[in-house]
Image (spheres, rainbow, N blue to C red):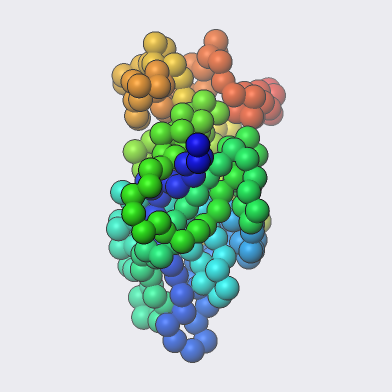
Amino acid sequence: MTQLTLLADRALIRLSAAGPGEDVRDFLQGLVTQDVRKVLAQAPQYAGLLSAQGKALFDFLLWADGADLLLDCARDAAEGLMRRLTLYRLRRKISIALEPALSVHWSLQAPDGASPDPRLAALGWRWLASTPAADSGSADAAWLAHRLALGVPEGVNELGDILWLETNAGELNGVAFDKGCYVGQENTARMNWRQKINRRLVVVPLADADAKRQRAAYPELGRSVEHRRVEGLAGLDLPAWLAGAISAGDDEAV
């Protein structure tokens, strides 16, 4: 049986220079949370586009394709992300458009040409390939179950309008603290300097759900994504990568 790898719920946005002297990396460098210079062939990077207050608007993976950059984002957020980027483009000659010829693929095994997920090694491997001519099934359900089992939030429904560091972006390699200015950088840098994050986005069993703090529910998987105060996380079975970060933060605060 052929393993399904296509993530049909993901879309790719291509940013390319549409005039002489334009540079899409320079354009994005002042907008997103990640150092765009780190995006190399076979080395995608996780990033966010924030509000001026440092709250998440969109999250995505950045891929290099020659001089172009590709944004691997939730399909239902793609149009909104393109509109937001277009607002920042002003008079710059940069093309921002969906890339229908390519699709995002995922697997727990490492096929030739795949890259490890930059957020967390346990998430598996990702790669871009030509879009199938016909509907051949997808790995979306398997990816969702695996991602939630590891406690990793993703997409506007889960992390939208939450302070970027409260989405665990620091632990998931979604911010470069030494890159200079970007939209929402001031509050993000201040939180990092204080080493005090009061709330966290966590994935908990549905049986432990708190409706007032719930961002998304997945009854078929028995999971709830919630925005909770750190002191309310005691007793929860958090993934090691997050539990260690919270413990270290508590130690710093003492």
Q: Position of residue 215 (x, y in %)?
A: 35, 30
Q: Could you tell whether 164 is left or right of 243 in the image?
A: left
> Quadrant of the image for the C terminus?
top right
- Which residue is at the far front? 1
So how many labels did they put on this image?
A: 0
Residue at x-position 38% and y-position 43%: 137
Q: Nearer the viewer, residue 142 or 90?
A: 142
Vertical placement of residue 218 versus 106, above or below: above
Look at the image and tell me whether residue 164 can be seen: no
Residue at x-position 52% and y-position 57%: 128
Q: Could you tell whether 11 is left or right of 168 in the image?
A: left
Q: Could you tell whether 122 is left or right of 96 in the image?
A: right
Q: Position of residue 155 (x, y in %)?
A: 40, 42
- Which residue is at the far bottom? 20
Look at the image and tell me whether residue 139 can be seen: yes
Q: Position of residue 140 (x, y in %)?
A: 41, 39
Question: In the picture, residue 43 is in which quadrant?
Answer: bottom right
Vertical placement of residue 77 versus 203, above or below: below
Q: Position of residue 105 (x, y in %)?
A: 50, 49
Q: Nearer the viewer, residue 29 or 96?
A: 96
